[in-house]
Amino acid sequence: MKVNFNKITLCGRELEYIKEAISIGRLEGGGKFMKMCEAIIAETASSESALLTTSCTSATDIAAILCDLKDGDEFIVPTYTFVSTVNSFVLRGAKPVFCDIRPDTLNIDETKIESLITPRTKLIVPVHYAGVSCQMDAITAIAKRYGLKVVEDAAQGFCSYYKGKHLGTLGDIGALSFHGTKNVVGGEAGALLVKDPMLCERANFIREKGTNRIRFIRGEIDKYTWVDYGSSFIPGELISAFLAAQLENSKSLTDSRIKAWEYYDKRLEPLEREGFFKRGKIPPDCKGNAHIFFIICKSPSEAQSLRDCAKSQDIAMLSHYAPLHSCPMAKRLGCPDTRLPVAEFAAASMLRLPIYSSITPGEQDAVCKVIEDFFAR
């Protein structure tokens, strides 16, 4: 049985909404479906507002501008993350200071953050890997103690919670993703969550190419003008229409993934007990969205052998990020040549299993059987 790593699950109204957007005759951003998306995201996240963007990268680009970074400023970030987490702030002149990760969740190790703070540190950028929250109480306490901002990369965290609070709402600013690989998709789309109303107003300027057009739309001014940095960060209506249909069904999409995650967790628990690998963990104060199910093998060679074995049977198992501190760009930026052993081992020994809302018990059984047979040998 062929099992893909990911599949987009359609909810039923995607094409209907796209046709409606076309019939309205407005395909640029800012229309009915963008507003619908923002309302659903804000309600789901219990956020005062949500600004839809062209991607999560765009959301972190806006966040970086809001942080008023200058050349030589530093930000603390886990080395195990996607490049967008870092690029947005590097483009504003800041330098990344890479932190190692926890072995259970692969999130930033909150116990290692404080030792990395210098007089140049301006913010902490926690990444909620696999839709499982970082230990945000500890991180926000450190930030408060040193007067730092917290920008959450919650790209994988829509419909995930920490102590009952939606990811992306625990720091000063949060960024969400609705990329085609996520649980709820728009193809390319993201959202920005901002606590401070003044910052949110400025984020609107930045999102609208640096203009105060939002005030013109509200009827507060006769014409709009250039008032800030900015770019074109608003998605078109066709993307918003597709995403709106997905967002309306975000609970059922998430519940289906959680059911699939729990199947893997229960089925593979005996193999972990025998010492073959470790499963990713969800701390008790976190409620995940089942974005990723991963295992960490005992060695890189064993992970590669299992991956090859699965591939020979048409079953996709994938590794993930290269630790950023070891990448060529980190050297160009003058980041120290250091060892971050937990991230380095995880990157080489971790495998993600196929998971999506429409995955069938038969597909999951095929995945688990490959793993069980591999370790039985």
Image (cartoon, rainbow, N blue to C red):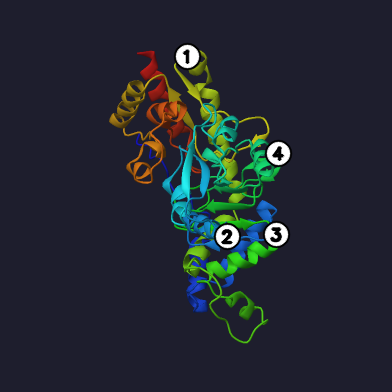
User: Measuring 55% from the left and 80% from the top, which residue is drawn there?
Assistant: 225
Q: Quadrant of the C terminus?
A: top left
The residue that mark 4 highlights is 163
Instruction: Determine crowd level at label 2: few under 14, some 14-19, many 20+ residues with C-alpha closer than 10 A.
Output: some
User: Measuring 57% from the left and 35% from the top, which residue is drawn there?
Assistant: 113
Question: Residue 181: in sight, yes or no?
Answer: no
Closer to us: 12 or 76: 76
Check if mark 3's residue and mark 1's residue have beta carbons within 8 Å.
Answer: no
Separation of residues labelled 4 and 3 (CA atoms): 19 Å
User: Measuring 35% from the left and 33% from the top, which residue is drawn there?
Assistant: 315
Q: What amino acid type should be assigned to the residue bearing mark 1?
A: Gly
Instruction: Determine crowd level at label 1: few under 14, some 14-19, many 20+ residues with C-alpha closer than 10 A.
Output: few
Number of the front mark, 3 or 1: 3
The residue that mark 2 highlights is 66
The residue that mark 1 highlights is 275
Q: Dot 1: what SS?
A: loop
Q: What amino acid type should be assigned to the residue bearing mark 2?
A: Leu
**On residue 48, which mark appears?**
3
Return the residue found at the far bottom: 222
Q: Dot 4: what SS?
A: loop
Q: Dot 3: what SS?
A: loop
Q: Is residue 96 left or right of residue 146?
A: left
Q: What amino acid type should be assigned to the residue bearing mark 3?
A: Glu
Q: Please tell me whether residue 239 is drawn above or below residue 9 in the rendered image.
A: below
Question: Residue 305: in sight, yes or no?
Answer: yes
- Counting from the top left corner in percent of width and height, residue 117 is at 57, 39
Q: Earlier in the sequence, mark 2 or mark 4?
A: 2
